[in-house]
Amino acid sequence: MKNFLTGSKIGMVLLSAALMTACSTNTGANTNAADSPAAGTAVTASATGGTAAAVELANVKTTDLVEYDADDTTTAWTADAATDITLAGTTADIKGAGATAKNGSVTITEAGTYILSGSLSDGQIIVDEQAKGTVRLVLNGVSLKDSDSAPIYIKEAGKVVITLQEGTENSVADGANYVFADAATDEPSAAIFSKADLTVNGTGKLTVTGSYKDGISSKDDLKIAGGTIDITAADDGIVGKDLVAVQDGNLTIKAEGDGIKSTNDEDTAKGFVAIAAGTFDITAGNDGIQAETAEVIDGGTFSLVTNGGYENAEVKTGDQGPGGKGMGGGRGGFGNQGAVDGTSAATTEAASAVNTAAAAADTAAVTTTAVTTAAVSTAEATATTAETESTSAKGLKAGGDLTVNGGSFTINTADDALHSNSNVSVTDGEFKITAGDDGIHADSLTSLSGGTIDITKSYEGIEGGNITISGGEIHVAASDDGVNVSGGNDGNAGQGTAQQDQFTGSGSGQLTISGGSVTVDSTGDGLDSNGSFSMTGGTVIVNGPTNDGNGPLDYDGIFDMTGGLLVAAGSSGMAQAPGEDSSQYSVSMSFTEAQQAGTLVHLEDGDGNNILTFAPSKNFSSVVVSSPDLKKGGSYTLSTGGTSTGTAADGLYADGDYTGGTQVVTFDISGSVTWLNESGVTTANTGRGPGGGGFGGGGSGTRPERGAGGTPPEGGAGGTPPDAAGETAN
């Protein structure tokens, strides 16, 4: 009996996002996590504003995907209604109907309950029930071994339920070389192999050793409703073609391939993973838990390590050095600092002219290399198709939507920790993440609406074609961008758009923050949107880059700031602030010399009321502050140094008194953004070269900055072509 949804229903519920045409509107009110909806919504606006498309994710639970019937959950049995099979080496004593023993193996041909005990030294339990009934195998202290095939081989049945009897320890082990029952399909291929629906339940223990290939594999549905299961596998630990569903259990998996996976790639209503609860300790050479289509986790405790963890990841250096220019839509160089660093207007104009000339030269280069670019794209697409599974070492991975509604996760991956080729939605849960690549990645929408997320190691912390943050407590440390709206997938699609956007400054994708708290520590850009940025609530703290090739804030479209608290500190060469049309007021301060990490930045109004006291965790030469407490016409003083008696969280001080600082500048607010240096009010930083949303990167680096798709990286000191395969095929 199938328990999956129909193709049309699962498409409506989970696998696709609903597109709704709407106008981008902002109320300016703060939205806290408690008031945030569980579904994530991204509003994609053009660089000039106007009509936008909202993408909304449904709030999906495991119960929307799978049901457990009475057979799945029943563990009780009686001796008078069962067939007893006592194993002894190469023989078996059978009491009851439905089973026969021959040549060291037992074949079951009728529906019913079969109680297995004793040991089988080199043989099989074969289920070949042609009437499509339910066969229950009760493992009551049994050891099964077969040197050249699957010790449990389910050839035919309507459903098979393996019950782990309470208080018993059971084992199933195969050999490294098989003699196939079906040479055309190389089956069986696992220590426990089923061509029918398979469920494991009970409270006993089962140890599975899959020396040939997989531990437990079903060519149909595979459900786990209980038990303590310990699997060691030469390839994958647990495989269910149509679905893998876990209601409860204690699973330990050591697999050279994937830990848990579903494989049906022919039907979008199948090939999913649904986990309601349980304990999972998975060490995998490839992905930890992988769904061909959708993956939904409602709860459980997870420890996942893939391919040796982040320490074993490919080395990536995405920091962008000065002066790079090329095809990828990255920054064209620092340009001039304008009035920010006190240079004359003539110098400013001269530097701007140089940047304009460089942009024109780049435009010509793009035109003359169009044919080459197309060839590169074709080659990269071919490489993506040819990419093997061995290159993917993600923690939680879904070909469709990945939804996490709760649970406790400790994830250490050589690749992305959470990855979807479609959408990622996190509504709750506790995450401790170290990742060799992205902490959280979605090709389409990344929606974070609750939970506690602590990404302590990553290349890029949070990435998506669109990103919405409406709740939760998020900490991100990244060796490149902290939060990155890439405007597309990890691969190289959309390169033409990237080339066009490089010179117009427009981009695709939207970063939307309406609630929760986000703290970023990045070597690359802190918050990076290759499209636009909207903030209506929440608290955002950025300890951004110290190199001038990146900025604490980086966007190519518009930044509409209407609510919440934003403080972003870092380098000044590429510094940006919220847009001039924002309804909430912002202050952007640039220093002529870098300030030391831990130096307090204090902003107060004319009456001495604290607006902000903040200690950046890294050296900084710019600080951007946007707060509901900033008012037009008000007088303010910015100071540095000193001490505070308040309580600090992520460098932000609450309450207490500030004393002993040095006043740097006093100013009045007259517009949405007030630009400052030590001399007073100045103008916006014009030091950004030709912008764009593609693969950036002037400096050296083996992996360019992701964007709306770019082509080869900028021709800085030693840049190499982007990852040929991307990640969408992983």
Image: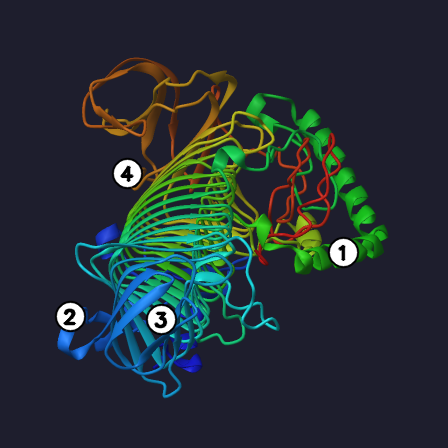
How would you rate the neighbour count of disc 2 (Cα within 10 Å): few for under 14, some for 14-19, many for 20 or more? few
Q: Is residue 428 visible?
A: no
Label 3 or label 1, whichever lies nearer to me, is 3
Work out whether residue 280 or residue 8 is closer to the camera in this orientation and state it: 280
Q: Residue at x 19, y 68 (%)?
A: 75
Return the residue found at the far top: 660
Indicate the amino acid at tag 4: Asp
Indicate the amino acid at tag 3: Leu
Q: Residue at x 56, y 64 (%)?
A: 179
Say whether disc 2 or disc 1 marks the residue closer to the N-terminus: 2
Which residue position is annotated with label 4? 629
Which residue position is annotated with label 3? 198
How would you rate the neighbour count of disc 3 (Cα within 10 Å): few for under 14, some for 14-19, many for 20 or more? many
| Horizontal and vertical percent position of residue 615 | 35, 23
| Horizontal and vertical percent position of residue 355 | 72, 36
Say whether disc 3 or disc 1 marks the residue closer to the N-terminus: 3
| Horizontal and vertical percent position of residue 213 | 51, 56
Which residue position is annotated with label 1? 379
Q: CA distance from mark 4 to mark 2?
A: 65 Å
Q: Is residue 687 above or below residue 422?
A: above
